[in-house]
Amino acid sequence: VKEPTYYINTKFVPKSKAYVHVNDLGFLRGYGVFDFLVTYNKKPFLLNKHVRRLFNSAEQIGLKIPCRNQEMTSLINKCVRKNTRFRELAIKIIITGGISKDGLTPSDTSTLAILTNQRKKLPGKLYKEGAKVITVDIQRDIPTAKTLNYTNAVYSMKLARKASAVEAIYIDKKEDVVYEGTTSNLFLVKKSKIFTPETDILPGVTRELVISLAKKHFKLETKKISFRQLITADEVFITASNKEVLPIVKVDRNKINGEAPGKVTKKIISEYKEYINTGKW
Ligand SMILES: Cc1ncc(COP(=O)(O)O)c(C=O)c1O
């Protein structure tokens, strides 16, 4: 049986035996943080950056970190080695406030779980032909932290699937600001220049890499983006650890670039692949 091995609170256990207590603050109150990354050639991609962001998320909500940065890194690597029977992995690291006595006070021992599953990719067709997104007038609570509260994401993705879209983009209609996807960051291209929102978003690891790769070939600016700027863009793409760089050709009912992936997006996709293939990360 191909069952992944998870790590939960000092133990490696098969997925079917991986449980947390019902009085865990993550379950009771959604008090916790997580991070997500994938492997290439069985090596975790930009692991240090993900661990750093995980700890930064924890710090933002005052959550006790269960171990040091170095320990976390080696623990994740150990978990990967216990799952080599899978070609590539999707890794989710979760830290919660632990088992609470009164349902509100975090425990001295945070819960730590590392979930390693076989990586699932989006259909290749979406990368060749481009995908659709919808916009939702919803904002994330503590946008710079990857907290466990993804209620808005679950709700918004239900609407997205109904509209045959791959992602929902959070916007603020009243303030006219475009933020990010439920699990991705957003970029647009106008007159060969690249733009991406700057504040009140999750600092995506893929976003950061794409920014540095893009700057070698294009002008790039991080700034506030309006809804109109989004739907009148020459090109749109989203980035995320699992999705990588995905061309967006429709935003709600608005076609982008005649519903075809654009030149700049294609260049970024090839640069991203090239960077992965170097293996030097
Ligand atoms: C809200 C949000 N924004 C952006 C991202 C993309 O981040 P990354 O590129 O580090 O995967 C994610 C990832 O899941 C996310 O949840």
Image (spheres, rainbow, N blue to C red):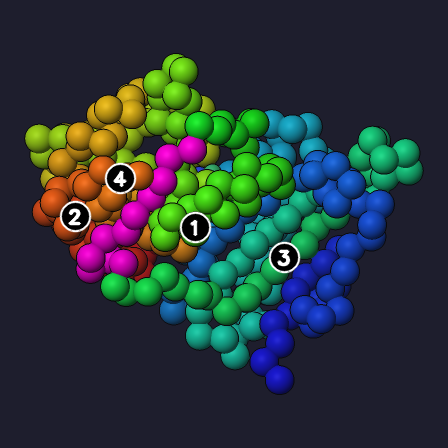
Residue in the foreground of this view, choosing between 119 and 95: 119
The residue carrying mark 4 is 253
Residue 78 is left or right of residue 259, and the answer is right
Where, by quadrant of the figure, is residue 201 drawn?
A: top left
Closer to the N terminus: mark 1 or mark 2?
1
* Residue 271 magenta: no
Q: Position of residue 135 (x, y in %)?
A: 37, 35
The residue carrying mark 2 is 259
Disc number for residue 114: 3
Closer to the N terminus: mark 3 or mark 1?
3
Give the number of the mark in front: 1 or 2: 1
Q: Is residue 55 visible?
A: no
Could you tell me how far apart the alpha carbons at marks 1 and 2 are, in whole angstroms? 20 Å
Closer to the N terminus: mark 2 or mark 4?
4
Residue at image point 33% right, 52% down = 244
Residue 130 is left or right of residue 33, and the answer is left
The three-letter amino acid code for the residue at tag 3 is: Ile
